[in-house]
Amino acid sequence: MELLQLQYFLTVARLEHVTDAARSLHVTQSSLSKTIQRLEEDLGAPLFDRTGRKLRLNEFGSRFLRRAEKALFELEQGKQEISDLSNPDYGTLELAVTTASTLPNILREFRKKHPDIHFHVQMLTTQEMVTLLHRGEVDFCLSSPPIQGDDIECQVVFNAPILVAVPKGHRLADRSSVPLTELKDEWFVGVKKGYRTRDLIDSVCESAGFAPKYVYEGNEPARVNALVEAGIGIGFIPSTAMNSREHIHYLRVEEHELALELALLRNRSRYISRAALEFRKVVVDYFESLSNF
């Protein structure tokens, strides 16, 4: 059994399509098919049920997949550990986020202290993040909401109040706070359902007796501030996403605890490099500075 066979098997098992897997691996379909066939011959059992170019793991394949993932995971951890010992000031951090509003500031601080350490960041849904965490394919995730699991280390680093953003000149622009019920006739801009902020806001507004009326629903949280500034509608903004634009005014929500917990997550079994330890320190220090502001 060869390492290459295991790597090819994992890719095919995850994509369940020969053409897509070959494209991902940058090999020909015939080469990929022959490699998987040799692996099945070595094991003495078929790993997939085949329908054309579509493949689906059978019982043999499902059982073998768990073992193969563990084996390749341990080999990758060993590779990273050796790299860390030989080059402690270099390397690449694999990061994932469900919310990106604070990330530029965090990465800026990290790069000031560790200019030779690179990073690769993915913006993911919560479920995509959980998948990568379980596989041990990322060093850290910055997530809202926090994610719990036997193999996941979860450290809540900040509790961000959710504020109401209105354009200057709005009837509420001279206020410091507002009850939710006073917003029932407003038009809102926000993110789509499925985002943590949106789902929380809709639920709390429902408990206050109304459903927000959205004139814009998008998948770019950073755009909400710009739309508020343009007077398209008002919006709910986590305090971590506030900006210094002169034409936006932020209000606290009265009588309701509206806040998002931000958590730093990692797979307990993944080797934690010196770079990863330094990154965690930068994140914790950054949010402590926000709490003390």
Image (cartoon, rainbow, N blue to C red):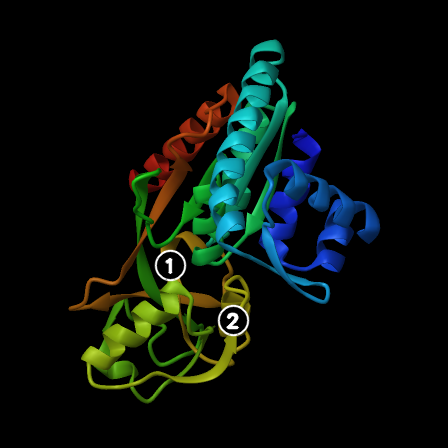
- Label 2: which residue? 229
Residue 151, quarter of the rendered image: top left
Tell me which amino acid carries mark 1: Pro
Q: Position of residue 88 (x, y in %)?
A: 58, 14
Q: Position of residue 1 (x, y in %)?
A: 65, 30
Q: Which dot, 2 or 1, sits closer to the camera?
A: 1
Which of these two is toward me, 279 or 287? 279
Instruction: Report if the CB atoms under discs 2 and 1 are less than 8 Å apart.
Output: no
Q: Position of residue 149 (x, y in %)?
A: 31, 44
Residue 284, quarter of the rendered image: top left
Tell me which amino acid carries mark 2: Glu
Mark 2 packing: few (<14 Cα in 10 Å), some, or many (20+)? some
In the image, what residue occupies the spot 76% across and 51% down? Answer: 22
Q: Position of residue 21 (x, y in %)?
A: 71, 53
Residue 184, quarter of the rendered image: bottom left
In the image, what residue occupies the spot 20% across and 62% down? Answer: 257
